[in-house]
Image: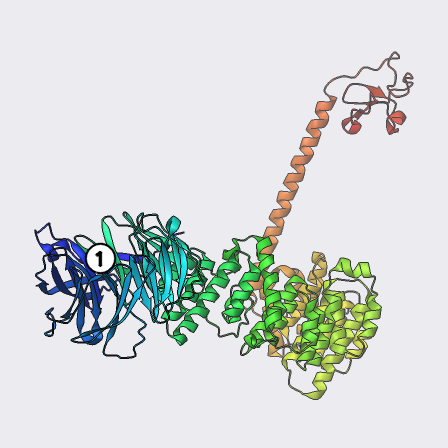
Amino acid sequence: MSVKAFKLVSAVEREMLMGDKNYINIECIECCGKNLYIGTNDCFIYHFLLDEKVSTAGKITFAATKQLHKYLGLKKPVSELKAASALTRLLVLCDNTITLVNMINLEPVPTGARIKGAVTFTLNENPVSGDPFCVEVCIISVKRRTIQMFLVFEDRVQIVKEVFTPEQPCAVAVDGYYLCLALTTQYIILNYNTGVSQDLFPYCSDEKRPIVKRIGRQEFLLAGPGGLGMFATVDGISQRAPVHWSENVLGAALCFPYVVALDDEFITVHSMLDQQQKQTLPFKEGHILQDFEGKVIVATNKGVYILVPLPLEKQIQDLLASHRVEEALVLAKGARRNIPKEKFQVMYKRILQQAGFIQFAQLQFLEAKELFRSGQLDVRELISLYPFLLPTSSSFIRSHPPLHEYADLNQLTQGDQEKMAKCKRFLMSYLNEVRSTEVANGYKEDIDTALLKLYAEANHESLLDLLVSENFCLLTDSAAWLEKHKKYFALGLLYHYNGQDAAALQVGVQIFTKRPLEEQEKNNINPDDIVSCLNKYPKARVKYLEHLVLERKIQKEKYHTHLAVLYLEAILQLKSVTTDNCTETTELVLKLRSLLQKSDLYRIRFILDKIQGTDLHMESAILYGKLEEHEKALHILVHELKDFHAAEDYCVWNSENRDVQYRQRLFHLLLSVYLTAGTSDCALVMAAVDLLNNHPAEFDAGLVLQVVPDSWSVQLLSPFLAGAVRQSIHTRRMTQVALGLAQAENLIYKHEKVKQKGAPILLSDKKVCQVCQNPFCEPVFVRFPNGSMAHTHCAANRHLNSNVTHHSPSSSNQT
């Protein structure tokens, strides 16, 4: 699979080098820093400065500036160029002679120092001399089967060794004392210091061009048989698998972790890490491919191009984006040598984490877990994928740039419930493993709270184990979650672990109250036993009785009475401690009133006796109302509480589902309570007026006018009088309408009767009863709609024969 590892960028265009001189061809190149040297077939050396430019979009280009050119005067092609920057010298091979020239002005050294009789040469990049002011040069001599070693200084050369080979050498590379040679029929490793040689593998130089390239300390790259790029060490062994080249490779270069090869039509890029071909670039007429200090340069006869490597981090991210995890990890490991240690560690951890999420999304959980561990993933990155698992108090913010492309688990699984369940099981397992390791340091609360939520949601047996052992579950989040999933025993354990035993007891009762009804019935638990069990815990007992009375609506007097007594005792207890009505007291009073109003099952006299002597006047009034002692109830509301609105409400709710007369009786009773005190109490007078004016429909206007004081003006009662008149007129009109409808209905019935009597019915002694088949003895009979007739006593018989049962006698006539 392809990877965009390099981009081909032009460096020196044809016009800059030769203008309109088409006969000029590039023979060799050398690059040292920004200095580019080109040797041509007409014996010229050209010197350019390369300026690298990066656009705002990140695009890299090169601008080549020509410095000068030099004619060597030999009318032979310049075969090879090598720079010795430490000496400021350029070694030039032309006409089998290596000349030393100045790198700046391209002039030969004044001493005329040179090496004659060289077919080709190379520099020892791992020198053994130890002298920083010289370079070691290895040449293949024009002498048959001869290799010569030279020391080249600033202005002189010195031969140090001459070595004879078993066959004529064609190509050579040097590392220390080791020569890697392509002979006529084979490759060998030769230690020129000891003379010991090691055969590598056979190779025919007549059939294809040999390639020998040093790629690292004591390691070489060779063009092997069958289009293979072979790696070999100085010990004659291969530590890497070969790469598969084409059969006609012309050159090779190294830009770690890639090996670049050139053939007639393409530039191919292989990874040294997994030996796979990663990229192919079309490139025709190329004949030179070399690397210079990490810069890969390729040339045709007419132009020079640079293979610009894309940043390794971008290559890795591209691989991850394509979900090619293994390749990305191999490349990341290989990048270690090119990146500073600290920067590499940060980058590599992030890559491992990204790879882990890719494997996780593919449900490869074992691989994902190992990558998360190796990458030291902040486990909250994983938890945050699961909605609502992180505590609401968590300050966690996801990594930026993000480690994955998913908003949450729903998007990752595309709503697939089976996949979602697998992901949740994996997280349970992973959190359980890491919660006791250093991975959890700093956010144990987040881990344990998430684990608790997963256990509760899945009804997992480990939930209780988590809560009875040391844990860091956050109380608020965990309690709400357990309540949501009805894990009341676990909720009690949570409160107990956090030292809140009182709350634990309150929750404990929900084990009984919140279970499904069918489960309670199945287990046949007697509510009386539970109430007895909870006697030591008053609040829990109240909750359970509320469950029985208010939720399950069990119609048993003892539960309703017991709950009312518990409410009452709790209220009196609170009132004995403080005279102020606290929130708890208010809530209990409202609960008691609601129970007293809505329930008809409690023992009214028993509760009333307990309330006597307290200030619970409203409750007393409710109880008197239940006993139909409305005058006492209203007297309490009006004269003791002076709550006129409550008195009106009393009349309303006590008359619900009762007839109009009962409702009027209650309102007239309230009016009489207002008026019995005389007219001296202005508050009662105004309450009576408001009662009449606000509820005119609830009174008999005639009776009202008899009881109200004569001193009241018509204007004072005008709303009541207007409402009463309106109600009277409305009632009269509705009565007239009803009467008219009844008269119309009666007329319809009379019409139907006349219609039925319209045709004569003949009865003779030949007619027989359709039921008993006997003749009629008297002119009294029943006629059915189908025309058949029967005796009256036979018609009363419901067991008619099948002929008669098809017709209903409901519309029959008797004569």
Residue 692 in the image, given as x and y percentages of width and height:
61, 66
- Residue 702: name its quadrant: bottom right
Query: Furthest residue to the top?
Result: 766
- What's under tag 1, amino acid-wise? Tyr
Residue 196, position as x, y percentages in the image: 39, 67
Residue 527: percent from left, percent from top:
82, 67
In the figure, is residue 268 to the left or right of 684?
left
Q: Nearest the camera: 28 or 662?
A: 28
- When the figure is inspected, residue 757 is found, relative to residue 434, above or below; the finding is above
Location of residue 276 (image quadrant): bottom left
801, 212: nearer the viewer: 212
At horizontal 28% and vertical 62% (from top left) the residue drawn is 146
Residue at 59% over, 51% down: 730
Image position, residue 406 (x, y; %): 47, 60
Q: Is residue 82 above or below residue 419?
A: below
Q: Quadrant of the C terminus?
A: top right
In the image shown, does 610 or 212 lie closer to the viewer? 212
Task: Answer with the quarter of the image where residue 526 lies.
Answer: bottom right
Q: Which residue is mark 1?
A: 305
Identify the residue at image location x=88%, y=23%: 791
Above or below residue 572? Residue 688 is above
**Dot 1: what SS?**
strand
Mark 1 surroundings within 10 Å by alpha-carbon count, few (fewer than 14), some (14 through 19), many (20 or more): some
Q: Is residue 625 visible?
A: no
